[in-house]
Every structure is written in structure tokens, then in C-alpha cells.
Image (cartoon, rainbow, N blue to C red):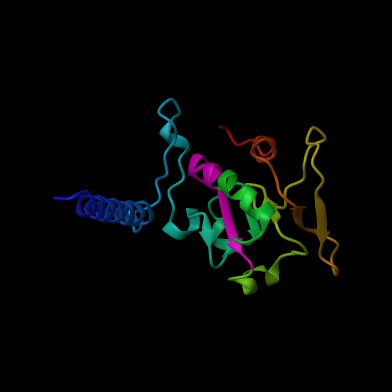
């Protein structure tokens, strides 16, 4: 075989391997149930099992807040977009925390450019914005130790605290501090 034919064969094999690798990477976890487990050194008695597998999946196309509150877990819903730069910076943090906090907290992401109707019931003015809810279903009220700016929203008619939100991106350290402030064990 001459060098030209050998080079064509090698390039073709490489391209096939690359395409197969990409396909496997994108499809290896599709259809699997979310895993709700604590690290081996933690007790299984603290686990919360999802009633609906979509409740613990990171990316959401809809939010049933009442159903999420039934788990009695802290909730952080990030409203952003896949093409927003600060949102892209937060994406790995959300993915990591969603995986780590399975059964201890609910971490969700809603792409408002693809699913804008989901944000209509929340006070979203900019993206990213995180809506934060305590395990008892009430809006999060940060302790004095948290050095992060939050916006508090109340119902116009009753004055009752309705939402606590953070506008802009959060680092992993800040997200962990918020979760710790809501007494989520790591």
C-alpha cells in the first residue's frame, strides 16, 4: 500500500472513532434514572427518593414548585440561558452541585430563552437569577454570615415574603455557602 492510501485509511479510521466517541459521550447516560445516593460514609437514612425522576434532573423545561416543595429539601432554581456568558460560567457549578446534592437539595436550571413561560411566575429581571427556597418551602432568608446580596420580594396584597433571589452568577463557593446556611450537609 502506498503512503497516500495508508494516510486516507488512517484518517478515515480516526474520523469514525471521533464520531463514535462523541456519540457515546452524548448518549451514555440518556434514559438512566437519576441516582440519589450519599457518599459511602454518610447514612442512607437521610436520602430522599424522587417520586418523579424529572424532579431531581438539573435541566428543567417546567417547574412544579408545589411538587418540589413536597420533598422538604432546599431548592435552588437557576434561571439562565445556554448562550449567556455568566450562565455558561455557572453551568459546571450547577452540574456538580446537582450531582452531589441528590437527595439533600434540589438544584435546577431553566433556560429562559427556550422555556420563557416557566419564568413567568418568578421575579426574573436578568439572567442568571437564582430563586432560593428553604426545606420548609418558605423563601430563604440569609444569615448575617452570608456576604452575598439577595433581593427579597413580597406579595403586594399581603406583604408576605414571596421570593428570595440572587441576580447574577454565583461561584461554587457561594452556592455551597448558601446550601450550608440552609443546613445542607455536604
Which residue does the image show at 32% across and 53% down from the upper left? Answer: 24
> Where is residue 39 drawn, in percent x and y?
44, 31
Residue 110 percent location from the top left of the image? 59, 62
> In this image, 95 relative to 25: left or right?
right
**Residue 165's x, y, as percent?**
75, 54
Residue that appears at 72% across and 60% down: 127
The answer to whether residue 130 shows anywhere in this view is yes
Q: Residue at x 55, y 55 (%)?
A: 70
User: Dividing the picture into quarters, in which one does residue 185 lie?
Assistant: top right
What residue is at 43 percent from the left and 48 percent from the top? 49
Q: Identify the residue at the far bottom of this view.
A: 117
Quarter of the image containing the C terminus?
Answer: top right
Q: Is residue 133 left or right of residue 154?
A: left
Residue 172 to residue 165: above or below: above
User: Which span is picked out in magenta?
Assistant: 95-112
- Residue situated furthest left in the rendering: 1
Residue 101 in magenta?
Answer: yes
Q: Is residue 14 left or right of residue 135?
A: left
Q: Residue furthest top?
A: 41
Q: Is residue 75 visible?
A: no
Q: Position of residue 102 (x, y in %)?
A: 48, 44
Residue 149 sits inside the magenta stretch? no
Total number of numbered labels? 0
Amino acid at each position: 500500500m502506498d503512503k497516500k492510501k495508508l494516510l486516507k485509511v488512517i484518517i478515515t479510521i480516526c474520523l469514525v472513532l471521533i464520531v463514535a466517541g462523541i456519540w457515546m459521550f452524548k448518549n451514555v447516560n440518556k434514559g438512566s434514572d437519576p441516582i440519589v445516593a450519599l457518599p459511602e460514609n454518610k447514612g442512607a437514612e437521610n436520602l430522599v427518593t424522587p417520586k418523579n425522576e424529572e424532579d431531581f434532573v438539573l435541566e428543567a423545561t417546567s417547574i412544579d414548585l408545589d411538587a418540589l416543595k413536597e420533598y422538604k429539601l432546599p431548592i435552588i432554581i437557576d434561571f439562565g440561558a445556554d448562550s449567556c456568558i455568566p450562565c455558561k460560567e455557572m453551568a459546571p457549578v450547577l452540574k456538580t452541585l446537582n450531582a452531589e446534592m441528590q437527595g439533600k437539595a434540589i438544584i435546577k436550571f431553566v433556560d429562559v430563552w427556550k422555556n420563557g413561560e416557566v419564568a413567568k411566575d418568578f421575579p426574573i429581571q436578568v439572567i442568571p437569577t437564582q430563586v432560593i427556597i428553604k426545606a420548609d418551602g418558605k423563601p430563604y432568608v440569609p444569615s448575617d454570615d452570608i456576604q452575598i446580596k439577595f433581593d427579597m420580594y413580597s406579595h403586594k396584597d399581603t406583604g408576605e415574603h414571596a421570593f428570595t433571589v440572587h441576580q447574577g452568577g454565583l461561584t461554587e463557593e457561594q452556592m455551597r455557602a448558601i446550601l450550608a446556611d440552609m443546613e445542607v450537609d455536604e
